[in-house]
Amino acid sequence: MPSSHNPHVHDQPPPAEHKARGPASIECGVITCSDTRTPETDKSGQLIRELLTQGGHRIGAYHVVKDEPVEVRELVRELGEQPGLDALIINGGTGISRRDSTFEAVDGLLEKRLPGFGELFRYLSYKDIGSPAMLSRATAGLYQGIVLFSIPGSSGAVRLAMEALILPELPHIVGEMRK
């Protein structure tokens, strides 16, 4: 006699209910890695901050730093010790040019990686821009009790990452980290 219980579905709440368990407002840090941008010319950093605040989140730190691995790592470590900070979004330096070194600076710090973030970002980028999407080394993971996202610095990539992936999932991720 067939059972009405699906053995492949775990007894967990539906996804919307599961996500609703996370905090509604999260304190976030934003870092722009660039050799040329300043706080005044940093359109991508401004866009990230605008989208976060529109989503009800708080900005606890904002920095523009040269794409130098030592400087980036030092700043990430410093922000990882900042009380109350739950998320860090880094933009810039994720490509493959000689000066793109944010991935190397960040990847070694991650205690747990979220490979699905980079995979989904590249998939969505591919649908948008085609095969150049494979050049992105967007990544995410956990570091010192915060979730860290490293995304490309173009405004289009920032908007895609924020609207399609980061903002919808941020409360859920932070809620899971706090368990």
Image: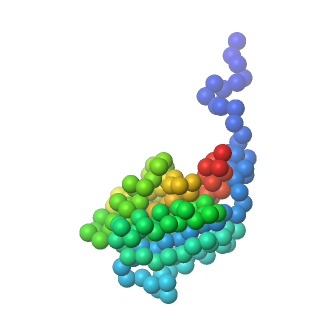
Task: Residue 96: name its quadrant.
Answer: bottom left
For image coordinates 41% across by 60% down, the residue present is: 106
| Image quadrant in which you'd find residue 15 | top right
122 up-or-down from 12: above or below: below
Question: Which quadrant does the C terminus fall into?
Answer: top right
Residue depicted at 50% across the width and 80% down the height: 43
Residue 65: x, y in percent?
Answer: 42, 76
Describe residue 115's horizontal placement relative to residue 56 as left or right: left
Whole-percent x, y for residue 177 in the image: 61, 49
Question: Where residue 76 sits in the image (x, y, percent)?
Answer: 47, 65
Q: Is 34 displayed left or right of 167 in the figure?
A: left
Give the total of numbered labels: 0
Say which residue appears at 54% left-offset and 75% top-offset.
62
Q: Residue furthest top?
A: 1
Q: Is residue 85 visible?
A: yes
Residue beneath the point at 64% across and 63% down: 84
